[in-house]
Amino acid sequence: MSDIPEPSLTITGGNVVDGLGRAPFKADVVISGQRIIAVEANAATRGSRQIDATGMTVMPGLIDAHCHISFDEPNSNDELFFHRREGLAAIIAAANVTKLLAAGVTGFFDADSLYEIGVDLRDAIEAGIVPGPRMRTGGNALLTSVGGTAGRLIPDEGRRGYGKVVNSRDEIVAEVRRQIKNGVDWIKVHVTGPTPRQKIKGEVQVWSLEELRLVCDTAHELGTPVVGHCRGASSTRDAALAGFDMILHATYMDEAALEAVVEHCVPIVPTFTFQANLAEYGAAIGASEEIRELFQKEITESAAMLKKAYDAGVPMLCGTESGFPLTPYGDWHYRELEVFVRDLGLTPLQAITAATSANAFALGLEGETGAIEAGRLADVIVVDGDVARDVSLLGERDRIRHVILDGSEVTIPPLVARRDPPGWRPSNYGSRVLTRAVVDNITGRNPKSHQAKSAG
């Protein structure tokens, strides 16, 4: 008897982009069960079922290393913290993961989640209860009472939304252990946050190096990696020195931060999709020119240092911060590749690697997924067009012809418009204060003219 597995699916005639940086090549991709068993020419007769990919790109499914699946696109932290119910947030998150599959995403990392529902959603996906991509998750982000990116909305102690405030060494250790007991894949720390009167670029570091080391030591003793939100030079430097396993953003690095990141080879997820969307398209949603310029500056003033880190061997990973109004689920998971090519100077093949085989690190599946080669898990997409020349094609939904996850083709149900449940969004009287001047402007009334007539 032959030891060769029986093929279950063969993708024929496509141009293979393997996710490992090699130039595209023509080959058939043979799948048996959950695995790719061969990538070779003229293998068409081996498969019990065939997909004709002639003229199309066959590549690994996208992995999004920064996605907030439980947030459901809130317009403010107020909405996120005070208008989300735990059970409903879990149900809606389960519906939203389908949008990721439709966009060719076969894996994603959710660093922190409302009510820690990420753990339950991941388990439901793995059990086959909810159809969705491979998922890895954190729990509540660890915050100091400075409040991370939510400022005064975060209490001085306790839990709110996606965050848990820790105020002492004992609280840090206890919270890290509690989250690991409950099944998180990562521990997330908000190392920086904005303050009302700050005078530095980026955000203010709100943890000491000693505290960051304590988080890492506690988590690593229990076999769990640590990821940090770092916008600023000192925070990026100290996160690398403390032993963080991955850094989100790492913007505004200086030479000391760059040296630390390179020395410790800490993977970076710049997550420029949010900034790029606001800078380029923010006018369409009413964003001011000032805020659009501010977000563009974060890209332009950080790109050179990030490219230096990449050239020195630091893994650069693709994440999109999907889950906000500027980055709705299913629309922008390709966008970071586009930004990597345009602003960081990567080639399309390098950007694809950053979104596939390199990104498998965020899932804890390095060498297991993210590439088209024998032995890998069969997470594959078939895309109409030459993605190796133009990564923007991944943003055109109708070009993603087939999505194969764990060796099985995914049937994507039609995406239909939905209504928001009661209380899910804030109820506003309006977007402006109704002063008399506003009314006068609308009606064309001139108060000065009226006063002059009265005086006469």
Image (cartoon, rainbow, N blue to C red):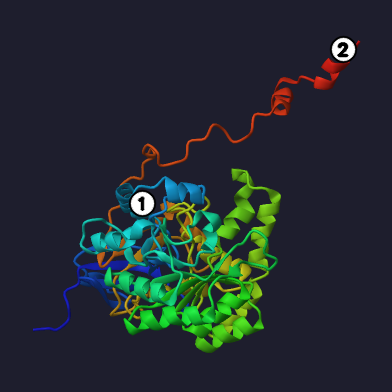
Gap in Å between the C-alphas at discs 2 and 1?
62 Å
In the picture of the structure, the residue carrying the numbered disc 1 is: 96
Q: Where is 391 relative to 76, above or below?
A: below
> Hey, what amino acid is under mark 2?
Lys
Q: Residues within 10 Å of mark 2 (few under 14, many from 20)?
A: few
Which dot marks residue 344?
Answer: none
The first of marks 2 and 1 along the sequence is 1
Q: Where is 184 relative to 22, above or below?
A: above
* CB under 8 Å between discs 2 and 1: no
Q: Where is 161 relative to 353, above or below?
A: above
Q: Nearer the viewer, residue 122 or 236?
A: 236
Which residue corresponds to the image point at 43% horizontal and 70% vertical from the top-left?
A: 188
Residue at the far right: name it. Answer: 456
Q: Position of residue 34 (x, y in %)?
A: 23, 71
> Hey, what amino acid is under mark 1?
Asn
Which dot marks residue 453?
Answer: 2
